[in-house]
Image (cartoon, rainbow, N blue to C red):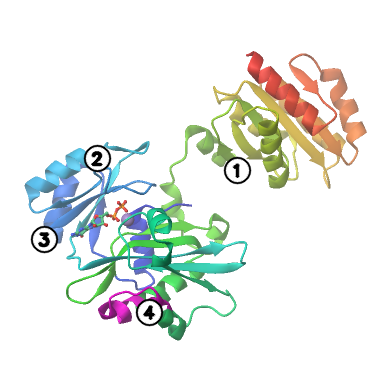
Amino acid sequence: MDLFEYQGKQFFASFDIPVSAGEAVTTVEDAVAAAERLDQWPVVVKAQVHTGGRGKAGGVKLANSVEEVREHATNILGLDIKGHIVKIVWIEVGSDIAEEYYASFTLDRSAKKHLGMLSAQGGVEIEAVAESDPDAIAKIWIDPVDGLDEATAREWVAAAKLNPQATEGAVDILLKLYRAYTEGDADLVEINPLILKPTGEVHALDAKVTLDANAAFRHEWAEYEATQSRDEREQAAHEKGLQYVGLDGSVGIIANGAGLAMSTLDVVNQVGGSPANFLDIGGGANADVMAGALEVINNDPSVKSIFINIFGGITRGEEVANGIVEALNRVTIDAPIVIRLDGTNADEGRAILEPHLSGQLQMQPTMLDAARTAVALAADR
Ligand code: GDP
Ligand code: MN
């Protein structure tokens, strides 16, 4: 779950990380009013979108007066930044910058450790630094059992060659940022730029935070949840409690289990097709869930064929087959469907589906055959 910058800053502030005071608004008039309330100039008018590179796109502007706030807010609200339309701007008190750094924590799955990255070259995209000057990024791998202690943070800051003036502030923020990352259940926390002010203070000027949605039950994240940007298909699937990711191909995919769903995408690609989505209906595959999944896929205009790939495990083949038959009675589907049913009691399940088969509803014995058929059907329409 991605946060807007202003939410990321609220999240950081709850872990005592210094950020600038500000207000999130949705209209030009409110932007002006917010700047007047802050009453410290300049203020910064910042586009709030779930993507980076806002500065380059004209989404971050300093304003020295009410007139400039009005001008920038007018230009930024409604701006399209990499396909994201700006609906919220964050007005914050401007900072004097002596130096810009980069700091982040994320999970390195292959190392089975947390990865911290720190660089004296901040303010620019870290990918560009990694490309041009990889040694300018000081990395540490942290064992989650040990955590990050002050001495290690201090060595890390030294390795990144930050201005010695920034050492104390940076160590303090990195320890707090690590706490925010772990205790806050984030998958990613990134500060770019982390700034050193001429006064010697260190401060988070930007915030990129991705929270682990699986940990939502132990947090108060309703406000973050409410502002998630999903496309229409993703929103509909989310409301039905389905694990869905929209893609841009033409073969609609329904599979039971995330692993099988991913393999299904791979196989469809392998035989020259392109998946319209990832959709995992979970282990159960009853009629309600199947009907919901079919509705979501059926409402996607780019879907030309549907591939239902089910492997019966604990859920037996005949239960799944009955669920599919019932779902098909409830939902009218436009695109042709190809089913592959295997696993526990596959024969019983196939026997249930058999009388319902037609050009519109086909069955194939293997995943590969079913993928080929679905891709061919999509290409024909
Ligand atoms: P991003 O482009 O989406 O990463 O947005 P940022 O919040 O990182 O802002 C981009 C750049 O704008 C920063 O790297 C700074 O150089 C500049 N900037 C942002 N806020 C301020 C501020 O308060 N004062 C000054 N002088 N520059 C700022
Ligand atoms: Mn930034």
Give 154 or 280, whichever is nearer the viewer: 154
The reply to whether residue 254 is in sight is: yes
Q: Which mark is residue 158?
A: 4
Which of the two marks, 4 or 3, is nearer to us in this view?
Answer: 4
Check disc 3 and report the residue beneath it. 39
Residue 118 colored in magenta in the image:
no
Q: Ligand 1: give its quadrant.
A: bottom left
Identity of the residue drawn at 73% across and 16% down: 360
Crowd around label 2: few <14 · some 14–19 · many ≥20 (10 Å) = many
Real-space CA distance between mark 1 and mark 3, rounded to the nearest whole angstrom: 45 Å
Task: Give whichever of discs 4 and 3 has the lower sequence position.
Answer: 3
Q: Is residue 270 left or right of residue 25?
A: right
Q: Is residue 225 above or below residue 371?
A: below
- Amino acid of disc 1: Gly
Check disc 1 and report the residue beneath it. 241
Residue 246 placed where, x, y %?
55, 36
Residue 3 placed where, x, y %?
41, 53
Give 202 or 72, whichever is nearer the viewer: 202
Real-space CA distance between mark 4 and mark 3, rounded to the nearest whole angstrom: 37 Å
Real-space CA distance between mark 2 and mark 4, rounded to the nearest whole angstrom: 41 Å
Real-space CA distance between mark 2 and mark 1, rounded to the nearest whole angstrom: 32 Å
The reply to whether dot 2 and dot 3 touch (C-beta < 8 Å) is no
Check disc 2 and report the residue beneath it. 77
Q: Is mark 2 within 8 Å of ligand 1?
A: no
Identity of the residue drawn at 73% across and 28% down: 371
Q: Is residue 38 left or right of residue 121?
A: left
Task: Give whichever of discs 2 and 4 has the lower sequence position.
Answer: 2
